[in-house]
Image: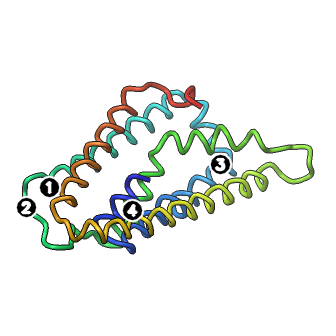
Amino acid sequence: MLLVIGRGVGQGRRTAFMSAVGMTLVAGFVQVLLLALGIASLVQASPFAFEVLRWVGAAYLIWLGVRLLGGFGRHTRSAAVARSISDSAALREGTINNLTNPKALAFLFAFLPQFVDPGNGWPVAVQLLVLGVVTKLSNFAVLGTVALGAVTFGRWLARRPALIAWQERFAGGVMVGLGLRLAFSGDVRSAR
């Protein structure tokens, strides 16, 4: 959510929206497919695979945060425009952010299967697909709304270029902090 807010505030509606699409729809397609195919169970059951995923996610968050912090003191923003990224970069960053987020994966792979009833006549894979799609579509509705709200706040900030620089520093620091927390917090599956 912080990534979408940061994109909305700093780069505008389209970039924030593309980040939300990557986080929910593109990453969701991959995650729901893995869930329905049962591959997710293998990752959940393998401590090594889950640890690798956790460390990759932590490294990615730290990398995003350092990139935001990299602009610290480099230049003062013009009246309204923060550093812009392409639609494909926003989509890619949103997708990678969600695919390497162990908490999102733990929710999908550990929480959703609890609502599957093998005895109701529907195949388990179909039930998982429906639950996963509904979850990802509701996530998209929430993140899309957050993106629009962040853009409104971003317009206000655009008239205050010094605040944009501080917002990026703050967002970068938070991402680095979250990455470090993820790296050193242990197994998130027990934090459900």
Q: Find the distance from the CA under tag 3 to the CA under tag 4.
A: 21 Å
Q: Nearer the viewer, mark 1 or mark 3?
A: 1
Circle 2/circle 3 CB separation < 8 Å: no
In this view, the mark in front (4 or 2): 2
The x, y position of residue 50, in whole percent, is 50, 33
- Characterize the local packing of mark 1: few (<14), some (14-19) or many (20 or more) Cα atoms within 10 angstroms: some
N-terminal of the two: label 4 or label 2?
Answer: 2
- Residues at badges 1 and 2 in contact (C-beta under 8 Å)? yes
- What residue does disc 1 label? 71
**Given contact means CB atoms under 8 Å apart, are the residues at marks 4 and 1 in contact?**
no
Left or right position of 73 against 112: left
What secondary structure is found at the residue carrying circle 2? loop
What is the spatial separation of the Cα atoms under label 2 and label 3, in whole angstroms?
45 Å
Q: Earlier in the sequence, mark 3 or mark 4?
A: 3
Front position in the image: 127 or 78: 78
Residue 171 position in % (x across, y down): 29, 50
> Could you tell me which residue is drawn at 86 percent across and 43 percent down?
118
The disc placed on residue 15 is none
Instruction: Name the N-terminal-most of marks 2 and 3.
Output: 3
Please name the residue shown 15% across and 51% down the image. 70
The type of residue carrying mark 2 is His
Q: Eyeballing the image, is 109 above or below 184?
A: below
Kind of residue at disc 1: Gly
Local SS, label 1: loop
Q: Which residue is mark 2?
A: 75
| Quarter holding residue 87 | bottom left
- Residue matched to label 3: 35
Q: Earlier in the sequence, mark 4 or mark 1?
A: 1
Q: How many angstroms separate mark 4 from mark 2 (CA)? A: 26 Å
Question: In the rendered view, does 89 fall on the left or right side of 80?
Answer: right
Q: Residue at x 91, y 44 (%)?
A: 119
